[in-house]
Amino acid sequence: MKETIFEVLVYLFEHYIDSGEEQAQALEPDKLKGELLEAGFTDNYIDRAFDWMDELTRQPSKAVENYVGQGSTRIYSPEERLRFDVDAQGFLLFLEQAGIVDSTRRELIIDRVMALGDSVLSVEHIKWVALMVLFSQSGMEGHYSQMEELVYGDIPFELH
């Protein structure tokens, strides 16, 4: 059995969401849940993944004015520091400095990664959640393409 919300979300994204809008819209929730159960996911994690996606879709999707000045520093809360390893924090900083995400999307990524519930969050978590966040945001197609290359390409990330 596959046992994390993260695994359900990645499976959904790879098999349904990113494969084409028509296919994703044609699936009924009950049918999709049945297919996920057949793929080996548990009912509890499927429901939690659906809730996670619902929360993501409730977030504002327009490009919003970013009021945080350039060069600002994100201070992680004690809970975030316990869950984000150093590489994950560094990768998120890299995404922001590379212009792939702005501070608004960074905060949305942190929120959605924390909502996964995993005890330690890796670069892999950040990559996939950033991809899903950018996919859900209107006007972020170019940024999504850059993130897609980081997820699907064999570009290693090493913190120096």
Image (tube, grey):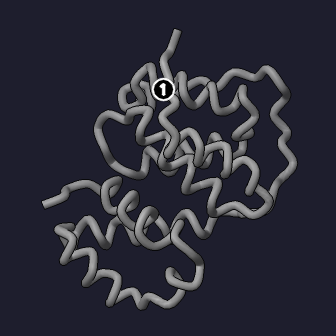
Can you say whether 2 is above or below 40 in the image?
A: above
Q: Residue at x 52, y 40 (%)?
A: 153
Question: Residue 19, can we see it?
Answer: yes
Q: Which residue is mark 1?
A: 156
Q: Residue at x 76, y 50 (%)?
A: 142
- Identity, as a three-letter code, of the amino acid under mark 1: Pro
Q: Residue at x 55, y 56 (%)?
A: 132
Give x and y (percent) for residue 9: 39, 61
Q: Residue at x 39, y 33 (%)?
A: 122
- Within 10 Å of disc 1 (Cα), the crowding (few <14, some 14-19, many 20+) is few
Can you say whether 126 is above or below 45 in the image?
A: above
Give x and y (percent) for residue 67: 85, 39
Give x and y (percent) for residue 93: 62, 26
* Residue closest to the eye, 55 or 25: 25
Quadrant including the N terminus: bottom left
* Residue closest to the eye, 154 or 127: 154
Q: Name the quadrant containing residue 3.
A: bottom left
